Amino acid sequence: MAATELEQVVNLCKRRGFVYPSAEIYGGSRSSYDYGPLGSLMLRNVREAWIRTMVQQRDDVVLIDAAILAPPQVFEASGHLANFSDPLVDCTKCKQRFREDHLTDPNVCPNCAAVGSFTEARAFNLMFKTFAGPIEGAGAEVYLRPETAQGMFVNFVNVLQTSRKKPPFGIAQVGKSFRNEITPGNFIFRTREFEQMEMEFFVPPAESAHWYQYWCDARMRWYTDLGIPAEMLMLRPHEADELSHYSTGTSDIEFKYPWGWGELEGIAQRTDFDLQRHAEHSGQKLDYFDQANNERYVPYVIEPAAGVTRAMAAFLLAAYDEDIVNDEPRTVLRLHPRLSPYKVAVLPLSKKDTLTPLARELYATLADRYMVDYDETQAIGKRYRRQDEIGTPLCVTVDFDSLEDDAVTIRDRDSTAQVRVPIASLLSEVAGRLGF
Ligand code: GAP
């Protein structure tokens, strides 16, 4: 089962400290969110799962971390200043603003139901502009990046010269991006401040079609390997009128959100568009000399572009489940162990001092390797439920017998089955069950 209503996950996230509306004490915001103690751990896990697959397990992709603020020249060259806009319409009756391409009926206002009340659509550029230094004005403008991708293009030669890679190879990056979205919404699905994980894969032009297919398949697999059921995902090629200004072909990995199918990640064929444009605008050579074939060429680019925050939403929605355990309803997040905020919870059966030293010792041993929760409040059943609800795959219970038999109980989140395990083999038992 997965969440059927967005509210199920929104409420759980608020209740358990995954996600809060940003600056909530001042009324909160629909356009950005703060990630709490559990949400920030989970975001880190999503990032690390991506870096593990996209960088660590490959010898043809390197990681960078480029600046968020960039001068206008970058976005003039990339085409974002001219083209990165959405069609904005105003309702003349209720004064609300909408993205024209998101309206179900382009004649009817979804807020006040007025008919024919929209202004002509105008192009609204989505980039946030600010000023660097103490003087505002021309020459001091900088932009908050709307995608991490340009950091890879402007550093193409730096990386080529310092990393000893040659096409086909990729440059990956994880970091914040900013878009002045006209209609942010659906919780963390569309926000104005969000996090992306993108990789630009530079290939000989003749290999572009092969690598496009390769990355479409690989990226679908990443989500299913991390527990999203295949039937909640589909690959949808863009229609010609949906393509970004830099793309000759894009497929979206779509996820079945409670409100319908929607984008989770895009895989685009950016050709040599960005490198050519930056070469023209900067006057620098952004190409590759292939010594084996004695030819110089500008590589083509295949770009898998995902959202950290949007992926977290999808993982939470897919993992959400409600079942009955011991005749009581239970909410459980069936998250992949790599994604769950805590991997293990150590729970002394009672708060009595006699159990504390052993429980603390086991906590320290496990915490050396994993993110571990320690909880000695409330009845044990309630503590299990709390861990189920935040997706902790394993609970380790220390009871009074543990002091005699040097063993503890391991409880599995999904099956709720409990087994007794010698303390001496606890670490290997946990590693075997988590898979790492
Ligand atoms: N460099 C290409 C690029 O940025 P995109 O399809 O606009 O392509 C890639 O964005 C991914 O970034 C999206 O599939 C989504 O996961 C995430 N994303 C984009 N805009 C977002 C927003 N406003 N809020 C949250 N995530 C967003």
Image (cartoon, rainbow, N blue to C red):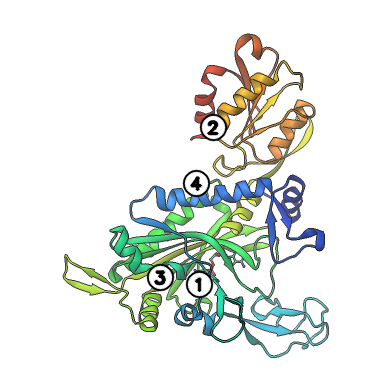
Q: Position of residue 302 (x, y in %)?
A: 40, 66
Label 3 lies in ligand 1 vicinity (Cβ under 8 Å): no
- Residue for badge 3: 153
- Residue for badge 2: 368
- Residue for badge 1: 238
**Label 3 Cα neighbours within 10 Å, binned few <14 / some 14-19 / many ≥20:** many
Q: CA distance from mark 3 to mark 1?
A: 23 Å
Residue 285 shown left or right of residue 183 in the figure: left
**Label 4 Cα neighbours within 10 Å, binned few <14 / some 14-19 / many ≥20:** few
**Residue drawn where x is 59% and y is 36% of the image:** 343
Disc 4 residue type (three-letter): Asp
Which label sits in the foreground, 2 or 1? 2
Image vertical order of residue 128 relative to residue 193, above or below = below
- Image quarter for residue 255? bottom right
- Image quarter for residue 140? bottom right
> Tag 1 or tag 2, which sits nearer the N-term?
1
Disc 3 residue type (three-letter): Phe
Which label sits in the foreground, 2 or 3? 2
**Residue drawn where x is 61% and y is 47% of the image:** 42
- Residue for badge 4: 225
Image vertical order of residue 125 relative to residue 174, above or below = below
Q: Secondary structure at mark 2?
A: loop
Q: Secondary structure at mark 1?
A: loop
Q: Quadrant of the N terminus?
A: top right
**Which quadrant of the picture is home to ligand 1?**
bottom right
**Residue drawn where x is 83% and y is 86% of the image:** 93
Q: CA distance from mark 1 to mark 4?
A: 25 Å
Task: Kindly check if marks 2 and 4 are in contact, taking CB atoms under 8 A apart as contact.
Answer: no
> Tag 1 or tag 3, which sits nearer the N-term?
3
